[in-house]
């Protein structure tokens, strides 16, 4: 279970803190303290540089605080909104710097993805799976990262993208089907 998960009572308590922060920004501090580390790690996995990750994470919280009055509670953890801002900041960073995007691949997440794609498991297959990830569009890679490497449920991914849970599932399975098709084509190329 990641630190992203929140219970209904935690979400309700968080909502009270957010209402107080909307009235007075000094009440934003507990929210910042609760989410800073997890968002920093999230950003760091994508940019692979601590200084850039710290700058981008600070930017996320600055934008969140400046736009807090626009935030409307929809029964979801506040972190959904923060992750959406973080994804946008990371995307903007890569557009502006023209740097190569990092993909932080965790072996357990990769293993789970291999099982869902129904691909056999050996060292060569793992390398092919990494190559298949490289064939995806950045937005597709982001969704894969959230689902498999951040270990978020479809519900959580849907909350971040502001889509339905069913839509998140459909998008993910289309991405996996695309990878499986590429893998089956690549498999023939290696024979």
Image (cartoon, rainbow, N blue to C red):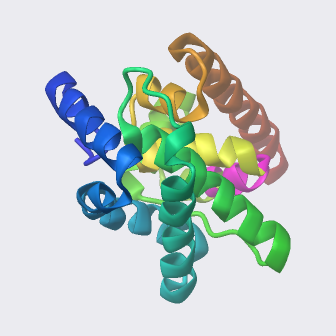
Left/right of residue 95 with respect to residue 149 in the rendered view: right
Q: Nearer the viewer, residue 78 or 45?
A: 78
Residue 138: within the magenta? Answer: no
- Extreme residue toward the bottom, this view: 51
* Residue 137, percent from left and from top: 79, 47
Q: Which residues are magenta?
A: 129-137
Q: Up-down: is 146 above or below 50? A: above
The x and y percentages for residue 167 are: 62, 15
Residue at image position (53%, 62%) is 60
Residue 146 vertical position relative to residue 190 in the rendered view, above or below: above
Q: Which residue reaches farthest top? A: 166
Residue 26 lies, in percent from the top left, at 31, 62
Estimate the x, y position of residue 68 in percent, counting from the top left: 49, 46
Q: Is 34 situated above or below 84?
A: below
Q: Dominant secondary structure of the magenta stretch?
A: helix
**Quarter of the picture holding the N terminus:** top left
Q: Nearer the viewer, residue 14 or 84?
A: 14
| Residue 126 seen in this snapshot | yes
Q: Residue at x 42, y 59 (%)?
A: 106
| Residue at the extreme front of the image, as rendered | 23
The answer to whether residue 111 is visible is no
Q: Magenta span has 132?
A: yes
Seen at 55% across and 57% down, the residue is 66
Give the camera-side residue of 117 and 173. 173
């Amino acid at each position: 279970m990641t630190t992203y998960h929140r219970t209904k009572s935690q979400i309700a308590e968080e909502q009270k803190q957010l209402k107080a922060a909307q009235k007075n920004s000094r009440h934003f501090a507990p929210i910042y303290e609760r989410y800073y580390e997890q968002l920093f790690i999230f950003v760091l996995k994508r940019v692979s540089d601590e200084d850039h990750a710290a700058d981008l994470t600070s930017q996320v919280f600055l934008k969140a605080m400046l736009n807090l009055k626009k935030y409307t509670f929809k029964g979801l953890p506040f972190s959904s909104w923060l992750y959406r801002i973080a994804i946008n900041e990371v995307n903007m960073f890569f557009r502006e710097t023209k740097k190569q995007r990092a993909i932080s691949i965790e072996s357990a997440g990769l293993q789970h993805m291999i099982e869902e794609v129904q691909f056999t498991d050996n060292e060569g297959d793992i390398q092919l799976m990494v190559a298949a990830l490289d064939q995806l569009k950045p937005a597709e890679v982001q969704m894969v990262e959230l689902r498999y490497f951040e270990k978020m449920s479809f519900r959580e991914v849907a909350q971040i993208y502001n889509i339905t849970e069913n839509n998140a599932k459909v998008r993910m399975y289309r991405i996996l089907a695309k990878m499986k098709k590429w893998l089956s084509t690549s498999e023939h190329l290696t024979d």
